[in-house]
């Protein structure tokens, strides 16, 4: 295969990437108005060993523009347009392979919400999900999308609050199951802390209502299975309470007594290593494993979105990875959004994306 840049310079090679992996890790470009394309370009340039075996599902022109943003026009790699997935094993060294799976009929403006950008991002996600479900890709890593842009992309995509729900829908359709038969959860992880959420993209009022016996127990089951599969051991799971001081024996709320503790008891009966409920203002510190030291727990189950994500993000979004648990595919993503405020400046940090690629490759083994 021959690949060329937008100036006509060409490279040829024998497809060294195909020797290292039999199936690619698909990286979706994210919202083209955000930082997704430029962190992808930066990751290929700065971490070539980590990105070996990866390809991008996106728009070729957008990725070429991203290479110019981060290099002042002197990007050392060529952007290779793949005609089909079958071309991937033949990509020469020092080429950034892109499979064109979306249509941008006009340039997007950096930092602005648009239906065009949202639709392009969604089309890439759908293609990558279906290819990974079919076994054609080893895993998928998703660059950030903008939820308002997704909502503006038309009825086909507006019903999904974000990546997680869209991927759940695609996986359920692939398996021929109802959505309710394929529960999923979000795990946010870095080298020091892992948290899994009982609910994801809900208002706080709705999230409180989602703290039910069935939802908590289901989260414990999904967490136990996913972390055990990744680590090979029986994970130590801590459960955060919902209320201050984990309810203080019922003084500050009875959810711990009537919902969370009974779910933990059932999990223990099923053979899981689960403890709690613990005061949410201290349990994350107990689970933290700084500088390679072991924490008291392997993972914390949190009752709602911000309760679980704030501690991980406080430790540094540049190393955080979002993992969707419960899907019949491996999906990871960076622990940050589209960063519209800095998009188009070539300043975005690719560390979290690189960490997401590493995690995806580890989980896909």
Image (spheres, helix red, strand yellow):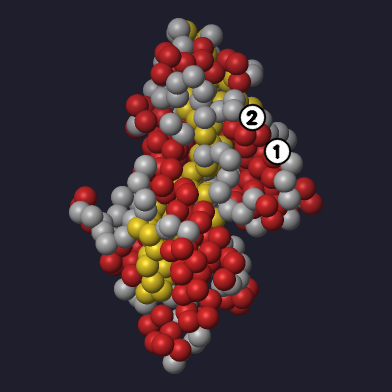
* The residue positioned farthest toward the front in the image shown: 269
Question: Label 2: few (<14), some or many (≥20) within 10 Å?
Answer: few
| Viewport quadrant of the C terminus | top left
How far apart marks 2 and 1 lie (CA) works out to 8 Å
Q: Secondary structure at mark 1?
A: helix
User: Picture coordinates of residue 231 (x, y %)?
Assistant: 36, 44
Label 2–label 1 contact, CB within 8 A: yes
Q: Which residue is mark 1?
A: 174
Identify which residue, 196 or 63, lies in the foreground.
196
User: Picture coordinates of residue 168 (x, y %)?
Assistant: 64, 48
Identify which residue, 78 or 154, lies in the foreground.
154
Image point 53% across, 64% down: which residue? Answer: 217
Q: Which residue is mark 2?
A: 134
Image point 45% across, 89% down: which residue? Answer: 250
Q: Is residue 161 visible?
A: yes
* The residue positioned farthest toward the bottom in the image shown: 251
Identify which residue, 338 or 277, lies in the foreground.
277
Residue 216 falls left or right of residue 151? left
Image point 35% across, 26% down: which residue? Answer: 49
Question: Label 1: few (<14), some or many (≥20) within 10 Å?
Answer: some
| Count of marks, rendered view | 2
User: Picture coordinates of residue 6 (x, y %)?
Assistant: 54, 20
Image point 44% across, 92% down: which residue? Answer: 251
In the depicted structure, whether residue 21 falls above or below residue 141: above
**Which quarter of the figure has residue 121?**
top right
Residue 67: which disc?
Answer: none
Identify which residue, 261 or 10, lies in the foreground.
261
* The residue positioned farthest toward the right in the image shown: 155
**Which quarter of the figure has residue 158?**
bottom right
Residue 36 falls left or right of residue 120? left
User: Picture coordinates of residue 111 (x, y %)?
Assistant: 56, 51
């Amino acid at each position: 295969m021959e690949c060329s840049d937008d100036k006509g310079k060409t490279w040829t090679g024998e497809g060294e990437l195909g020797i290292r992996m039999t199936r690619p890790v698909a990286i979706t470009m994210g919202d083209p108005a955000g930082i997704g394309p430029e962190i992808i370009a930066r990751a290929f340039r700065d971490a070539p060993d980590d990105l070996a075996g990866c390809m991008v599902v996106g728009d070729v022109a957008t990725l070429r523009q991203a290479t110019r943003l981060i290099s002042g026009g002197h990007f050392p790699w060529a952007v290779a347009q793949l005609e089909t997935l079958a071309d991937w094993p033949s990509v020469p060294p020092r080429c950034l392979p892109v499979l064109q799976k979306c249509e941008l009929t006009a340039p997007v403006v950096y930092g602005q919400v648009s239906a065009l950008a949202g639709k392009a991002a969604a089309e890439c996600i759908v293609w990558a999900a279906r290819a990974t479900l079919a076994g054609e890709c080893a895993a998928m890593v998703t660059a950030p999308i903008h939820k308002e842009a997704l909502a503006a992309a038309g009825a086909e995509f507006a019903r999904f609050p974000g990546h997680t729900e869209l991927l759940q829908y695609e996986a359920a359709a692939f398996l021929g199951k109802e959505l309710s038969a394929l529960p999923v959860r979000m795990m946010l992880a870095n080298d020091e802390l892992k948290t899994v959420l009982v609910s994801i993209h809900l208002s706080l009022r709705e999230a409180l209502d989602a703290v039910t016996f069935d939802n908590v127990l289901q989260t414990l089951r999904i967490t136990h299975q996913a972390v055990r599969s990744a680590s090979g051991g029986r994970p130590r799971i801590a459960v955060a309470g919902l209320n201050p001081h984990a309810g203080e024996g019922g003084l500050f709320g009875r959810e711990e007594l009537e919902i969370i503790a009974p779910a933990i008891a059932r999990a223990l009966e099923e053979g899981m290593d689960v403890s709690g409920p613990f005061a949410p203002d201290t349990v994350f510190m107990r689970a933290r494993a700084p500088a390679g030291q072991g924490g008291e727990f392997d993972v914390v189950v949190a009752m709602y979105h911000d309760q679980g994500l704030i501690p991980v993000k406080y430790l540094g979004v540049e190393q955080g990875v979002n993992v969707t648990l419960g899907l019949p595919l491996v999906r990871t993503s960076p622990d940050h959004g589209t960063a519209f405020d800095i998009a188009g400046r070539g300043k975005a940090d690719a560390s979290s994306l690189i960490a997401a690629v590493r995690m995806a490759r580890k989980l896909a083994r």
